[in-house]
């Protein structure tokens, strides 16, 4: 079974409470439930990890590679601005497929992701539906790379 790691970066655990005008009112646990239902429907294993610390995200990615994950989806959130060490971790993982997702459109907010150069693709500006788009994109990428 395909194994995907989803990392939710700094501040994402506060979904539904933090800046609802940008991020909406759906809570992190509600989003997790929706994403786990998608995983069951599409027959893949999804591990969701929340952290406010960049070093924990790095450690979880390396652990995931050691545990044979097939790909990574991440909303780096607060790590977007200065996450060079996180980017270097992804690049060090030897071609680990990575899709970056953001709830809002970073370009409209004049934000540049330092992790973008490590990503196979980016999804942004589609709200929470962007997670489904990112997971579907990663599944397609994995299917085409394995075929």
Image: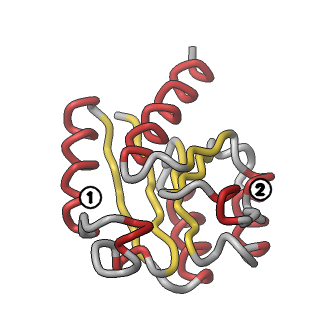
Marks 1 and 2, Cα distance to the nearest angstrom?
28 Å
**In the image, is 7 to the left or to the right of 120?**
left
Camera-nearest residue between 32 and 58: 32
Residue 104 vertical placement versus 98 (above, below): below
Mark 2, residue position: 91
Residue 43 vertical placement versus 76 (above, below): above
**In the image, is 108 to the left or to the right of 45?**
right
For image coordinates 49% across by 48% down, the residue present is: 69
**In the image, is 12 to the left or to the right of 88?**
left
**Looking at the image, is mark 1 or mark 2 nearer the viewer?**
1
Q: Please state, as top left, top right, bottom left or bottom right, where the N terminus lies in the image.
A: top left
| Residue 15, x across and y down, in percent | 33, 73
Q: Which residue lies furthest to the top in this view?
A: 147
Q: Please state, as top left, top right, bottom left or bottom right, where the C terminus lies in the image.
A: top right
For image coordinates 73% across by 63% down, the residue present is: 113
**What secondary structure is marked by label 1?**
helix
* Residue 46 - label: none
For image coordinates 78% across by 65% down, the residue present is: 114
* Residue 31 - label: 1
């Amino acid at each position: 079974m395909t194994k995907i790691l989803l990392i939710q970066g700094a501040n994402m655990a506060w979904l539904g409470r933090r800046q609802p005008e940008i991020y909406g009112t759906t809570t992190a646990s509600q989003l997790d439930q929706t994403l786990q239902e998608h995983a069951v429907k599409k027959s893949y294993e999804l591990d969701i990890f929340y952290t406010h610390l960049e070093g924990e995200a790095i450690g979880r990615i390396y652990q995931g590679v050691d545990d044979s994950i097939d790909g990574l989806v991440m909303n780096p959130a607060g790590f977007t601005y200065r996450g060079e060490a996180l980017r270097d971790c992804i690049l060090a993982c030897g071609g680990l497929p990575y899709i970056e997702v953001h709830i809002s459109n970073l370009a409209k907010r004049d934000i540049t992701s330092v992790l973008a150069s490590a990503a196979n693709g980016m999804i942004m500006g589609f709200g929470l539906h962007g997670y489904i788009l990112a997971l579907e994109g990663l599944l397609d990428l994995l299917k085409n790379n394995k075929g």
